Amino acid sequence: MGILSRASYVIRSKLNSVLNRAEDPTETLDYSYEQMRDQLQQVKRGIADLTTQKKRLEMQKRRLEENVEKHNDQARTAVQQGREDLARRALEKKKTKMNQIEDLERQISDLQNQQDRLIDQKNELQSRIEEFRTKKETMKARHEAAKASSTVSEAMTATGEEFEDVGRAIERAEEQTEDMEARAAAMDELHESGAFDDVLSDKDNIDRELEQLSTDSGVEAELETLKSDVGADDAESAAEQTGEADEAELTDLEGEDQDEVEAELAELQDEESA
């Protein structure tokens, strides 16, 4: 194989590969179906044209047959009048018309045969078109189903590069999330255990515990002071209430004594008067 032949073969193979990738089977089937319908319409137009020609010949044949009858009557009339020359001329025209009628009959017969063949071909073509249409719709349905199935399979198996990138992105996100969660849990554990020193203070755990104890002692001392103050206030209030009660009782006693004294004085006065 020469260089030009090899180059031509390679180019044709490349073009064929490109066309195969660009070709949509459903569009190809629809286009083929439309082409077959166009052919059927051409056959129908051919049958109509042929039928028209046959009808014209049949009309011409009827006119010739009418002329034959006319010439036959002319010949009979001429013989009755003794004009054999006119009768002979009429019979000659009759013969010519009859010959033409025979030619027309042959042509009409040929056209009829062609018409019958075209009708048979038209019927066969129409039947094939209907059969092709059924197959076409079936193939289109199968193609769409296969295409959908392939798409779903690719999505489920993640065979495409896009799905692989998405899978890797999800894995990276999960890893980063797990690292962040683990770091947060470790920080919480260290914070609760006191393993950290406050970054804003130079005190260690002992200093902070001593400060806490000092704070707690101060709070306790203040609490005791409040309790003492509250107890003293309560005692003073009770003493005041007791003093008031005693004064009231003394007042009542003094009142009773004064009444008795006055009663006794009254009795003495009565006795002196008597």
Image (spheres, rainbow, N blue to C red):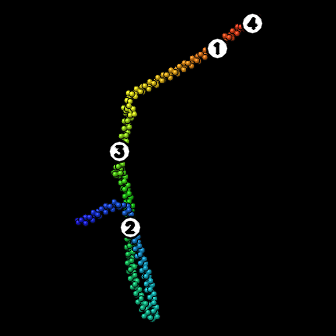
Where is the N terminus found, in terms of image quarters?
bottom left
Residue at the disc numbered 4: 270
Dots 4, 2 in contact, CB < 8 A = no
Label 2 environment density (alpha carbons within 10 Å; few <14, some 14–19, many ≥20): few
Dots 3, 2 in contact, CB < 8 A = no
Which residue is depicted at the point 50% across and 20% down? 228
Is residue 238 shown left or right of residue 69? Answer: right
Tell which circle, 1 or 4, labels the residue nearer the N-terminal end: 1
| Type of amino acid under label 3 | Arg
| Type of amino acid under label 4 | Asp
Q: Nearer the viewer, mark 4 or mark 3?
A: 4
Q: Nearer the viewer, mark 3 or mark 2?
A: 3
Residue at the disc numbered 2: 35
Label 4 environment density (alpha carbons within 10 Å; few <14, some 14–19, many ≥20): few
* Residue 251's disc number: 1
Q: How many numbered discs sit on the rendered protein? A: 4
Q: Nearer the viewer, mark 2 or mark 1?
A: 1
Give the CA distance from mark 2 to mark 1. 138 Å
Q: Position of residue 83 (x, y in %)?
A: 44, 94
